[in-house]
Image: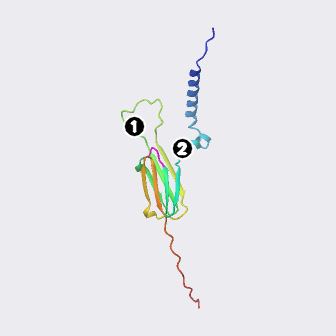
Amino acid sequence: MSTRSNPLEELERFFERMSRQFDDTRMWDPSGSLGRLSSEIGTMAIDLVDRDDEFVATVDMPGFDRDEIDVRVTDHELRIEAEHEETLDEEEEGRYIRRERRRESADRSIRLPENVNTDNVKATMKNGVLTITLPKLEAEEARGIEIEDAS
């Protein structure tokens, strides 16, 4: 009589092997394809909308609190940096089977298409979404220059 193997057990072993291999490859050289993938996870997606007299940037920041985010603006650039570190409660300390919660950081700079009034920039955060309102700098009206005689 032949014994048949359980296909679900084989599938479970396959996924365990794949998981172990993936965990091992995460430590490879960052210039490799998996290194690029892990670095892309740390970047943030930004939507920038032009609303006539202002720009509005919307940034997904899941897992970050507002006090962990630093927003800086110059006339032509918006820079966002965020850093988050999981702390362990004494009750949670012990022998981990798997630990994936750790320090996370992200940063991003984008060039703004026009000068902005850096004194009136406002930022709000709700449900992990950062919204930055950047009022445009009003262009000065052209004024006539009288040409003098050089003699």
Q: Residue at x 55, y 27 (%)?
A: 16
Quarter holding the N terminus? Answer: top right
On the picture, is 45 further left or further right than 124?
Answer: right
| Residue drawn at 59 percent across, 20 percent down | 7
Nearest the eye: 100 or 48: 48
Residue 122 position in % (x across, y down) = 43, 58
Image quadrant assignment for residue 114:
bottom right
SS class, disc 1:
loop
The secondary structure that dominates the magenta segment is: loop
Residue in the foreground of this view, choosing between 27 and 122:
122
Q: From the image, which quarter does the C terminus lie in?
A: bottom right
Q: Residue furthest left?
A: 90
- Residue 41's disc is 2
Q: Is residue 101 above or below residue 69?
A: above
Does residue 73 sit above or below 38 in this rendering? below
Which amino acid type is marked by label 2?
Answer: Ile
Mark 1 surroundings: few (<14), some (14-19) or many (≥20) residues within 10 A: few
* Residue annotated with mark 1: 88
User: Of marks 1 and 2, which one's residue comes earlier in the chain?
Assistant: 2
User: Magenta region: which residues?
Assistant: 60-64
Amino acid type for the residue under numbered disc 1: Leu
Residue 54 location (% of width, % of height): 49, 62
Q: Which residue occupies the extreme right position in the image?
A: 2
Looking at the rendered structure, the secondary structure element under dot 2 is helix
